[in-house]
Amino acid sequence: MIVTVTMNPSIDISYPLATLKIDTVNRTNKVTKTAGGKGLNVTRVIHDLGGDVLATGVLGGFHGAYIAEELKKAGIKQDFTPIAEESRDSIAILHEGNQTEILESGPTVSKDEQAAFLEKFEELIKQADIVTISGSLAKGFPPDFYQKLVQIAQQHVVKVLVDTSGESLKQVITAKQKPYLIKPNLEELEALLGQAFSLEELDDIQAALSQPLFEGIEWIVVSLGKHGAIAKYQDTFYRVKIPKIQVVNPVGSGDSTIAGFAYGLSKAMPPMDLLKMCMATGMANAQENKTGHVDPANVKNHFEKINVKKIER
């Protein structure tokens, strides 16, 4: 089973507008509300692919109840820890080809609630083969909280895929216990290392990923958007190139990439196929109106067209 962790879920609200008018009333009749947060996008895509998945994290208040009900309607297994404060909203205004976002910081989770979640995670991990950890931490959590989850998973010999950024990512990769995979995009890698990279100089990225800082991490997948990815598996580097597609909604494509990798890993796919699978799910998500959804037939179609080559050093 794949367990997905979302420590700051939200109701994702999308308002499409022909034009965003400032300092006046804007009206729309096409509002969409989705159980959101990066980890829940991962969950839905794995579910779409037919994978055995369970969602966990923290939920609170009326918003939390709405998120739980939406997952239930979709037939997705869940086991969340209740918290006192209200889960957040994340608002996206789609206008004139742009996306303007208003993101609440979310609830503050108490130390007792954190302890209750860790107790639950200890139980869930006994049923898991793979864990994905995605997105930000709610307020109250220490920056090394994800590292605690990695440590618990390692004690049970469970592979952990981490998709986060900033201090949480730094804490994860500098600790003794390493995740199985990290998936920074180029901007996140630059922020982590304090170094600028160019797509014209992929050797620099390879050199950066070969630093002692990353020792012990089996997989590093650096997503390059429409340019595909560069990946490192153990001591082997791969360049992934993807075909051009018509993008409908790119939000959640990074989460879908993690979902594809987790699903492929659960099916014991070899390295090159894992990379094709995770890129194919990211592409398929970008062609859906709804965030965090894929059509398995479209995933299969993209899979056949993705080019993966070993980089000779």
Image (spheres, rainbow, N blue to C red):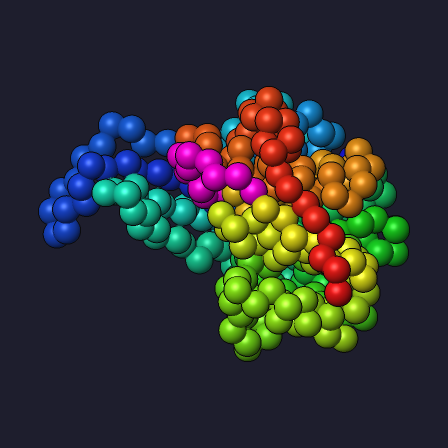
Residue 236 versus residue 267 in the image, above or below: below
Residue 244 sits inside the magenta stretch = yes
> Looking at the figure, which quarter contains the C terminus?
bottom right
- The one nearer the camera, 88 or 161, is 161
Q: Is residue 257 left or right of residue 93?
A: right
Q: Position of residue 221 (x, y in %)?
A: 66, 55
Residue 17 versus residue 309 in the image, above or below: above
Residue drawn at point x = 12 percent, y = 52 percent: 23
Q: Residue furthest front?
A: 312
Q: Position of residue 212 (x, y in %)?
A: 76, 75
Q: Position of residue 148 (x, y in %)?
A: 74, 62
Q: Is residue 254 left or right of residue 179?
A: left
Q: Magenta region: which residues? A: 242-252
Residue drawn at point x = 64 percent, y = 33 percent: 303
Q: For residue 74, what is the image quadrant?
A: top right
Q: Position of residue 157 (x, y in %)?
A: 88, 51
Q: Is residue 184 visible?
A: yes
Residue drawn at point x = 36 percent, y = 45 percent: 91
Q: Is residue 153 left or right of residue 75?
A: right
Q: Is residue 151 visible?
A: no
Residue 222 versus residue 33 in the image, above or below: below
Q: Is residue 307 left or right of residue 124?
A: left
Q: How many marks?
A: 0
- The one nearer the camera, 137 or 109, is 137
Q: For residue 250, what is the image quadrant?
A: top left
Residue drawn at point x = 63 percent, y = 48 percent: 240
- The one nearer the camera, 57 or 282, is 282
- The one nearer the camera, 36 or 82, is 36
Residue 222 versus residue 72 in the image, above or below: below
> Looking at the figure, which quarter contains the N terminus?
top right
Name the chief secondary structure element in magenta: loop
